[in-house]
Amino acid sequence: MLPAGSTKFQAPSAMKPVRGRGGLPAALSSGPRSRVFAAAAPAGGQKLTHPGKAILAGGIAGGIEICITFPTEYVKTQLQLDEKANPPRYKGIGDCVSQTVRDHGIKGLYRGLSSLVYGSIPKSAVRFGMFEFLSNHMRDDQGKLNSTRGLLCGLGAGVAEAVLVVCPMETIKVKFIHDQCSSNPQYRGFFHGVREIVRQQGIKGTYQGLTATVLKQGSNQAIRFFVMTSLRNWYKGDNPNKEINPIVTGAFGATAGAASVFGNTPLDVIKTRMQGLQAHKYRSTYDCAYQIFKYEGPRAFFKGTVPRLGRVCLDVAIVFIIYEEVVKALNKVWKTD
């Protein structure tokens, strides 16, 4: 019996099991694996995206996007291949489009599309899968990714996609487009072109300009994910799980795309030259940059900026919108928490 007016005995707070993130015992919530799953738990932190979902959603987004925006990529590549010393074949964007349509019809603006369709799906899959994999390990206890870590994750994603997919894909695409300029095109289609490139130059023939491609893709994704992460964090404020409207996502993506264009178009020009049919003229990435500067001047490093700006802004906006929406749909049918 307890004395009158007394309260029931309670165990000291020290006797209570200490709970970690997500309501798990502290002993179970520590360690590197727990960080990945902690933010996905209902503890008020930001939910993470499973890398498997990112790979699938990224591939779908990449395939749809390239079919929409390829003509701008075609024009950009033609203008970058149009060397001043030859002399130039095109007077500008409109002239490039009109000459292509006149000589090859509307289909001419889609020459090389097959190589990008085959490549864009795995490229986006690798990009988003690698970004989510890295970011899941670099978020804080609340599942938030700051801008600096977003930049590093983007850099890692860009390098991975450059080595695994982009370099061979871009080399084939540039050769296809450049081949159309010749009086006697040698490539009859994607598989024939790949077979001829490998037969004549070996596997390394599809890896021309690797250094420039790694620099370009690494800086591309570092800039884009840095901007996207910064804008998302600003928009969400103190609510990490706040939904972002697709229109807002598109606006953020276009902004990120524009930033990457102005940040690395010179690298894109060098990469394109290193992958063209005249790539044998250049001894290295540095020699290519030196020759462009010596014979064409610094303005040549920004050839194709306008068509690239239009394509990239649209590209990044579309990719992020489709990616986010596909992930939302996958979350309903694919439970990974």
Image (cartoon, rainbow, N blue to C red):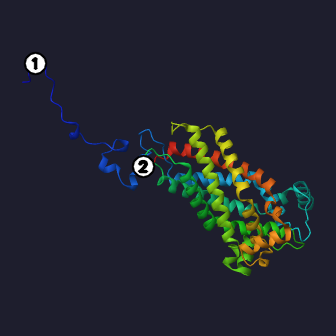
Q: Position of residue 102 (x, y in %)?
A: 93, 59
Q: Position of residue 328 (x, y in %)?
A: 55, 43
| Residue on which the image places disc 2 | 37
Characterize the local packing of mark 2: few (<14), some (14-19) or many (20 or more) Cα atoms within 10 angstroms: many
Question: Does residue 64 appear in the picture of this structure?
Answer: yes
Kind of residue at badge 1: Ala
Q: Position of residue 24 (x, y in %)?
A: 33, 44
Res. 173 image quadrant: bottom right
Q: Position of residue 232 (x, y in %)?
A: 59, 43
Is residue 250 left or right of 276 when viewed as pictured? Answer: left
Name the image quarter holding the N terminus: top left
Q: Nearer the viewer, residue 290 or 155?
A: 290
| Residue on which the image places disc 1 | 4
Q: Nearer the viewer, residue 26 or 245?
A: 26
Q: Secondary structure at mark 1?
A: loop
Which label lies toward us, 1 or 2? 1
Res. 209 image quadrant: bottom right
